[in-house]
Image (spheres, helix red, strand yellow):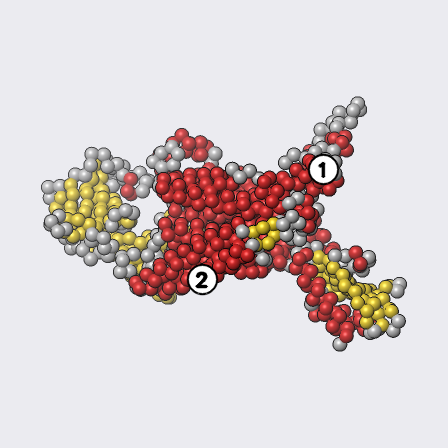
């Protein structure tokens, strides 16, 4: 936008000729200028745009905390714009926008700007809201006026006007000074008040989010049917504890997964997952409950959510009579096919002579019309087959990496195909693998989120403040009465600061109501 | 579980509604074409224009009836709320937008000329819905909650109102450009005249007007013949820009050249209609006010939808906010609409700049809805199924 520069402003911006050098602002002056700049509405607007831009980037670029897999694919070049672009994105920290220092800075600046905007507004609001309605002068010049004559004496007219405006929840003040008798009324402070509540609510949200971050805990645990875990730090496969969360904040109750149920619709899409659990405290069961999606279980300040599930075959591996492995292996779904896969670390004490078992379970293994084995679409394990690939050697199982990422090097030494209850001898009879039975495992999340109520309060305040700040409007109405013979001459006048179109209708109503009230 | 017969007739009524909207849209544009402006700026429809316009209204109302029937049957057939996938959501988006267009824009505000454009967005939304068609069926467990009634319906209602607001904003930008150019020309021809000079910086720059104003629009109509507004705008850009945008979009997404050309021609026609309609549109200040009021109405609903989404996420996924692409998208949409509301009360941002913020906000809304559901991996990806 180009603006024509008037000579006056040109003069002002010119440095004074001859005389002092332009002063370099000192630290206090710089800080004051910065503070003034931050308080400006246009700065707040730019900060909001920056916030939106950051969020757009975070939508388009996969975010490591949310979709770690996509980020990995972008980095390797399998997806996204290629590894070079990914390294640039990485350097800018755009794979974790909301955890980056500049996003934090943006939020801090926004709150500083908000504070700078709100403090003077609070002061002004308190001053204005306490002030009684001001007397009106030159009422004839206002945008909304109506005048009528009546034979009712002024005192009664004033009373009637007070009643009408009071009924309409105006703040009313009767002014009787040097001959002018007037009712001044005002309404709509709720607009500014609502706006202040709306903006203040963001501090509540911030406090709730910070409290949740510092004192919160979230842990994930996977357990097979019949298995149990105690609410202690070491029980969780993955955990995210805030700085204020202490180890003895864990409640220590024991959760046992009695049963896991999956039901399907006719088209084989899942209908519901239910974990039936028993919670025990000090060794005694205190309650049994169901945990399902959308219906978490709340116990002793902790909330248990249903997150994931999978198949858990019970596998026993023996070398001769020696049992090397006897446990349930947790298998996760392969996205595209109707298969479940997982890994069992069978033996890993000697780094050179380790044994691992890659397992794939087909819940619906059937023979097609030509007698060939194929995988059917039914996710229910009515006809399961377990395929195990045995790996032997230096597999790197001792390293702290996920079980599935061991060194597969020269490939499997043998393969077994088992039905439940089946047993197979492998590697020339040196090893035997038994598929005892099949169960489900359930993935639960256990959370403690202390800032929740505060967030809910903040959300409520935002809505409660937003509505009046958009719909309420400030307006003033005056009813001026001049004695005229035995009766009076009445002037009703009004002005609105916002929503003038709506006020015109309201003013007509008020003027008519005053007229009617005076006559009755 | 799904009742086949009901689902079938739901689809039939959907098609009836789509057809009715198309016919009504054409009728509204016909009405636009058969409007005359007299020299003193009074806009009046010709007899045939009025009649066709009334026919258009009637057909649109019939369309709303058929559409409602379709939605209700869909809900009965699936045994749940009829807004659980993108097909149903797009359909309802169109329904609410048309109802808002007929009831609020035409009936209450009296801007009948705008309804054709609202119908066009509805037709667009329904067509996209058809492309994303999913048979009536149950939903995945994560969606199986009463929060789908609260969160999704609020998001949908506000999105449709934002859609109407977008129509008003886009037309405001067009109308404002026209008014501005005409004013500049008359200023040039009355060189030195105070009336012209005042007009250049006058109604178009809304500095002096307080928020929610009713502007003095008499001046605008007095300055020049409304038809001059059409002549002031180049007729080339109006079909070319929307046509190209749509062609590129369809080619990029579906790689279907025929569909791209058809959709592009429709968009080009719509652009031409907008150009043609300029003189008959309400004054820019009124359009701006309509855009503001509709956005101010939809914004709290959108705020509530985002909050309800957070509460639902807390129940279903165990956290209230995880910066999932959908959450991020709804957040930036919210921030942009909030920026629009702030821009309107910021010196130097009122008028066109604020309107552009609203346009960007609407684009953000569309990204949040379509792009995030269809192309970006996240927890809301199931919604495309």
Q: Is residue B117 above or below residue A49?
A: below
Q: Is residue B155 visible?
A: no
Which residue is found at the position 63% from the left and 39% from the top?
Answer: B181
On the picture, is A428 further left or further right than B204? left
Residue picked out by circle 2: B62
**Depth check: B346 or A26 in front?**
B346
Residue A291: percent from left, percent from top: 36, 61
Q: Is residue B317 above or below residue A512?
A: above
- Quadrant in which residue A84 is drawn: top left
Sequence-first disc among 1 and 2: 2
On the picture, is B81 further left or further right than B224? left
Residue B174: percent from left, percent from top: 57, 44
Dot 1: chain letter: B
Q: Is residue A486 visible?
A: yes
Dot 2: chain letter: B
Which label is found at residue A428? none
Which residue is found at the position 47% from the left and 36% from the top?
Answer: A93
Pointer 2: residues within 10 angstroms few (<14), some, or many (20+)? Answer: some
Disc 1 from disc 2: Cα separation: 51 Å
**Depth check: A464 or A425 in front?**
A464
Residue B44: percent from left, percent from top: 59, 54
Q: Residue furthest top?
A: A18
Helix or strand or loop: what does disc 2 sit on? helix
Residue picked out by circle 1: B190
On the picture, is B323 further left or further right than A348? right
Which residue is found at the position 72% from the left and 35% from the top?
Answer: B191
Pointer 1: residues within 10 angstroms few (<14), some, or many (20+)? Answer: few
- Quadrant in which residue A126 is drawn: bottom right
**Depth check: A112 or B62 in front?**
B62
Which residue is found at the position 30% from the left and 63% from the top?
Answer: B4
């Amino acid at each position: 936008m180009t603006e024509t520069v008037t000579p006056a402003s040109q003069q002002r911006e010119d440095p004074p000729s001859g005389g002092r050098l332009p002063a370099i602002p000192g630290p206090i002056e710089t800080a004051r200028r910065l503070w003034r700049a931050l308080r400006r509405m246009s700065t707040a607007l730019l900060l909001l745009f920056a916030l939106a831009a950051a969020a757009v980037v975070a939508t388009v670029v996969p975010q490591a905390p949310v979709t770690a897999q996509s980020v990995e694919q972008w980095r390797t070049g399998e997806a996204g714009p290629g590894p070079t672009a990914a390294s640039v994105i990485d350097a800018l920290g755009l794979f974790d926008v909301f955890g980056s220092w500049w996003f934090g800075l943006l939020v801090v600046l926004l709150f500083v700007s908000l504070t700078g905007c709100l403090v003077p507004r609070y002061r002004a609001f308190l001053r204005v809201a306490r002030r009684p309605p001001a007397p009106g002068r030159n009422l004839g010049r206002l945008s909304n006026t109506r005048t009528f004559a009546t034979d009712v004496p002024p005192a009664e007219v004033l009373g009637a006007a007070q009643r009408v405006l009071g009924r309409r929840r105006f703040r009313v003040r009767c002014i009787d000074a040097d001959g002018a008798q007037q009712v001044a009324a005002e309404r709509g402070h709720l607009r500014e008040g609502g706006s202040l509540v709306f903006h203040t609510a963001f501090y509540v949200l911030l406090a709730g989010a910070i409290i949740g971050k510092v004192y919160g805990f979230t842990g994930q645990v996977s357990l097979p049917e019949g298995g149990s875990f105690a609410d202690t730090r070491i029980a969780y496969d993955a955990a995210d504890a805030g700085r204020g969360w202490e180890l003895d904040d864990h409640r220590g109750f024991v959760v046992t997964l009695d049963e896991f149920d999956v039901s399907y619709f006719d088209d084989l899409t899942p209908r519901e997952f239910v974990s039936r659990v028993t919670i025990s405290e000090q060794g005694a069961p205190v309650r049994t409950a169901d945990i399902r999606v959308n219906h978490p279980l709340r116990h002793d300040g902790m909330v248990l959510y249903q997150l994931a599930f999978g198949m858990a075959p019970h596998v026993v591996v023996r070398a001769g009579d020696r049992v090397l492995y006897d446990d349930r292996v947790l298998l996760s779904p392969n996205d595209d096919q109707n298969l479940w896969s997982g890994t069992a670390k069978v033996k890993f004490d000697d780094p050179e002579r380790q044994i691992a078992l890659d397992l794939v379970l087909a819940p619906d293994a059937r023979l097609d019309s030509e007698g060939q084995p194929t995988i059917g679409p039914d996710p229910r394990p009515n006809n399961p087959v377990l395929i195990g690939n045995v790996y032997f050697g230096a597999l790197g199982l001792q390293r702290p990496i996920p079980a599935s990422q061991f060194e597969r090097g020269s490939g499997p030494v043998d393969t077994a195909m088992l039905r439940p209850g089946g047993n197979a001898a492998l590697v020339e009879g040196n090893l035997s693998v038994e598929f005892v039975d099949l169960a489900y495992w359930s993935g639960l999340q256990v959370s403690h989120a202390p800032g929740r109520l505060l967030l809910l309060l903040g959300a409520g305040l935002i809505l409660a403040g937003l509505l009046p700040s958009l719909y309420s409007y400030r307006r003033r109405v005056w009813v001026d009465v001049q004695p005229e013979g035995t009766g009076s001459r009445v002037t009703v006048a009004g002005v609105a600061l916002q929503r003038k179109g709506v006020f015109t209708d309201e003013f007509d109503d008020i003027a008519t109501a005053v007229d009617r009230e005076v006559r009755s | 579980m799904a009742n086949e017969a009901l689902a079938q007739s739901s689809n039939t009524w959907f098609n009836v509604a789509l057809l009715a909207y198309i016919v009504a849209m054409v009728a509204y544009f016909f009405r636009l074409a058969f409007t005359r402006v007299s020299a003193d700026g009074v806009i009046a429809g010709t007899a045939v224009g009025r009649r066709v316009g009334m026919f258009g209204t009637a057909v649109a109302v019939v369309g709303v009836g058929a559409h409602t029937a379709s939605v209700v049957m869909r809900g009965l057939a699936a045994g749940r709320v009829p807004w659980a996938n993108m097909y149903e959501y797009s359909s309802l988006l169109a329904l609410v937008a048309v109802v808002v267009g007929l009831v609020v824009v035409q009936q209450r505000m009296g801007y009948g000329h705008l309804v054709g454009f609202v119908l066009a967005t509805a037709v667009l939304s329904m067509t996209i819905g058809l492309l994303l068609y999913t048979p009536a069926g149950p939903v995945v467990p994560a969606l199986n909650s009463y929060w789908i009634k609260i969160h999704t319906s609020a998001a949908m209602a506000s999105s449709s109102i934002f859609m109407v607001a977008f129509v008003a904003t886009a037309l405001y930008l067009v109308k404002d450009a026209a008014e501005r150019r005409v004013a500049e020309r008359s200023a040039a021809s009355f060189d030195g005249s105070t009336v012209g000079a005042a007009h250049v910086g006058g109604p178009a720059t809304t500095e002096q007007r307080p928020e929610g104003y009713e502007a003095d629009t008499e001046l605008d109509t007095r300055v020049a013949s409304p038809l001059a507004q059409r002549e002031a705008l180049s007729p080339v850009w109006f079909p070319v820009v929307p046509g190209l945008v749509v062609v590129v979009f369809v080619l990029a997404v579906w790689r279907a050249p025929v569909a791209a050309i058809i959709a592009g021609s429709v968009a080009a026609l719509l652009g031409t209609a907008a150009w043609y309609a300029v003189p008959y549109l309400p004054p820019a200040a009124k359009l701006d006010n309509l855009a503001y009021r509709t956005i101010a109405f939809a914004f709290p609903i959108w705020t509530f939808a985002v909050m309800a989404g957070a509460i639902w996420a807390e129940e279903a996924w165990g956290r209230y906010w995880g910066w999932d692409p959908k959450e991020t998208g709804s957040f930036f949409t919210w921030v942009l609409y909030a920026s629009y509301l702030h821009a309107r009360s910021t010196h130097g941002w009122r008028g066109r700049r604020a309107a552009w913020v609203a346009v960007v906000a609407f684009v953000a809304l569309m990204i949040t809805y379509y792009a995030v559901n269809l192309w970006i991996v996240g927890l809301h990806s199931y919604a495309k199924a």
